[in-house]
């Protein structure tokens, strides 16, 4: 249309609408306009770290359940939902239709007696926490960051730290799911109970979750304590630290022999001023040491230990949702496996030895957390008190060789991978790791008989031909 100026475009448009009003648009005109219409271009999508991407033919953002039902009935498959795009595994990429529930967000129907509230699926965890706090409520535990959508966090069994605290899906009392064919299903422990067991951790494969009724508790404060300690001592004290503190986690700094411990315990003490977040600076300093001294593990160890010699014990008091979740400014790719508690210490020692004996190029700390068992079919914590071990690689560096050297250690220790993080397992492997795998697949095939939610990557994961 470049040869048309604005005035002549207006002239022809006016003439065309006059003709349309008489029903007399000649076929040749409509065909000419159709030829001129821009072809529908795929809209590229990529995730937070940049390791997953796709070109969906449509990206749709419904504002209501009615609209969503209509979309599900007609949208081009494979259909996938995206939350905040913070998963590293290929759960979201599709060349078909990508749905986001960003416009279906917010907290409603707060019941202060039961301390329950409805949270719309697209609500980011940060907003959920702020809205609940305004009503004097808080979720009992939260992950490291609060950028995820609620539905995304549930779909992958996102978790925080705490030996007696479950992952995010354990706080769900009721769930609403819209099936791939557009049926609305409400489920809870007594109503559509099997669907409830499958849908709380579903990898987004059963349909679209539109809301969850979440169990909260009265708003509470935590005292957060951080300190540095030799990693061997930390591993030995792990069971005791996990038992005596509400939340306990630690980070091993590769090539240092040292670990940073973090505990959180409930307190009535007054809130202290929040210190500036130094995590990103610390990570970038570790990168600088890798860049300068990566060739010599012993020099690097010496430099890190010197730098950490006077690392102070720090304490901070704030409301739980403010101390539990932090910012992650330096991007990375991640693999996390969940292991039986008795297996984890030995697995961690082997991982550290593998990294340091092979001088693997990495500076991101290894994160170690405890999580309580639950009864949700595809939860990695299904009937298993867990310790999780997560390795990270800087997003600009290839992670494949590093993760390939670590993953077999998890396999040898009965690890189940985090659904949202990198791993190389497929359907048959998951069938061995999850006692309720077949029961889940039966529900999935019943809700999505045509496989509308199955991309090639999802088929591999689900073990579907
Ligand atoms: C910096 C960072 C920190 C992290 N920290 C933690 C942590 O502390 N603990 C932890 O366990 N994990 C952590 N993760 C992983 C993250 O919590 C999970 O991958 C989570 O699933 C991401 O949520 P999301 O909203 O981005 O979902 P996405 O990654 O966008 O989607 C995840 C899954 O949810 C599905 N989905 C999304 N919306 C819906 C819906 N409405 N209905 C049905 N299915 C839906 C998608 O199809 C997909 O299968 C972290 C990730 C990053 C990048």
Image (tube, rainbow, N blue to C red):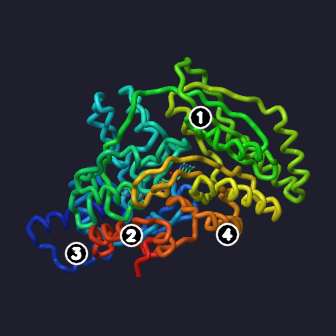
Which of the 4 quarters of the picture holds residue 249?
top right
Residue 465 in sight in this render? yes
How far apart in space, not on screen, are marks 1 and 3 (Cα)? 71 Å
Along the polypeptide, which appears first: circle 1 or circle 3? Answer: 3
In primary-sequence order, the first of circles 3 and 2 is 3
- Identify which residue, 440 or 42, lies in the foreground: 440
User: In 3D space, how far apart are the residues under numbered discs 2 and 4 (Cα atoms)?
Assistant: 33 Å
Residue at (77, 39) in percent of width and height: 229
Quadrant where the N terminus is found in the figure:
bottom left
Q: CA distance from mark 1 to mark 2?
A: 49 Å
Quick check: 13 above or below 65? below
- The answer to whether residue 72 is above or below residue 275 is below
Name the side, left or right, on which 74 lies relative to 2.
left
Q: Give the vertical position of 47 relative to 228 (above or below).
A: below
Disc 4 designates what residue? 404
Q: Residue 39: x, y in percent?
A: 37, 72
Question: Residue beneath label 2, please?
Answer: 57
For the residues carrying marks 1 and 3, which lies nearer the camera in this image? Answer: 1
In space, the residues marked 3 and 2 are separated at their CA atoms by 24 Å
Mark 1 lies on a secondary structure that is loop
> Are the residues tagged 1 and 4 within 8 Å (C-beta)?
no
Residue at 59% over, 38% down: 243
Q: In which image quadrant can residue 261 be found?
A: top right
Which label sits in the foreground, 3 or 2? 2
The image shows residue 230 at horizontal and vertical percentages of: 79, 42
> x, y percentage for residue 244?
60, 34
Question: Which residue is rendered at x = 57% and y = 47% of the image?
Answer: 370
Question: Mark 3 or mark 4, which is nearer to you?
Answer: 4
Q: Tell me the residue that label 1 is attached to.
A: 245
Q: Dot 3 corresponds to which residue?
A: 30
Q: Earlier in the sequence, mark 3 or mark 4?
A: 3
- Foreground mark, 1 or 4, reads 1
């Amino acid at each position: 249309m470049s040869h048309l100026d604005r005035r002549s475009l207006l002239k022809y448009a006016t003439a065309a609408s006059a003709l349309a009003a008489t029903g007399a648009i000649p076929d040749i005109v409509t065909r000419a306009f159709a030829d001129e219409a821009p072809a529908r271009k795929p809209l590229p999508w990529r995730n937070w770290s940049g390791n997953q991407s796709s070109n969906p033919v449509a990206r749709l953002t419904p504002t209501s359940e009615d609209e969503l039902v209509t979309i599900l009935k007609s949208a081009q498959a494979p259909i996938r939902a995206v939350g905040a795009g913070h998963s590293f595994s290929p759960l979201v990429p599709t060349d078909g239709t990508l749905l986001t529930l960003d416009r279906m967000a917010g907290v409603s129907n707060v019941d202060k007696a039961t301390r329950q509230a409805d949270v719309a699926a697209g609500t980011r965890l940060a907003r959920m926490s702020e809205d609940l706090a305004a009503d004097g409520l808080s979720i009992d535990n939260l992950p490291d960051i609060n950028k995820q959508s609620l539905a995304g966090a549930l779909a992958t069994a996102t978790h925080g730290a705490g030996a007696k605290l479950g992952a995010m899906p354990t706080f769900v009392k009721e769930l609403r799911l819209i099936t791939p064919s557009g049926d609305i299903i409400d489920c809870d422990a007594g109503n559509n109970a099997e669907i409830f067991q499958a849908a709380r951790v579903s990898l987004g494969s059963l349909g679209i979750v539109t809301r969850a009724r979440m169990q909260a508790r009265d708003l509470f404060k935590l005292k957060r304590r951080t300190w540095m300690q030799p990693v061997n001592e930390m591993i030995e004290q792990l069971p005791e630290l996990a038992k005596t503190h509400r939340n306990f986690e630690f980070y091993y700094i590769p090539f240092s022999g040292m670990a940073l411990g973090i505990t959180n315990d409930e307190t009535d003490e007054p809130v202290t001023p929040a210190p500036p977040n130094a995590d990103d600076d610390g990570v970038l300093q570790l990168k600088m040491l890798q860049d300068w001294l990566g060739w010599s593990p012993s020099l690097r160890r010496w430099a890190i230990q010197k730098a950490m010699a006077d690392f102070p014990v720090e304490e901070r008091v704030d409301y739980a949702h403010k101390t539990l979740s932090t910012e992650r400014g330096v991007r990375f790719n991640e693999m996390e496996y969940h292991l039986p508690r008795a297996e984890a210490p030995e697995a961690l020692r082997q991982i550290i030895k593998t990294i340091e004996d092979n001088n693997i190029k990495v500076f991101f700390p290894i994160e170690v957390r405890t999580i309580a068992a639950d009864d949700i079919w595809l939860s990695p914590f299904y009937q298993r008190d867990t310790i999780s071990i997560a390795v990270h690689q800087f997003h600009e560096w290839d992670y494949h060789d590093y993760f390939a050297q670590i993953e077999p250690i998890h396999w040898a220790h009965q690890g189940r991978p985090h659904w949202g993080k990198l791993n190389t397992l497929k359907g048959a492997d998951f069938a061995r790791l999850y006692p309720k795998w077949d029961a889940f697949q039966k529900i999935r095939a019943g809700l999505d008989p045509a496989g509308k939610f199955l991309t090639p990557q999802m088929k591999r994961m689900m073990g579907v031909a």
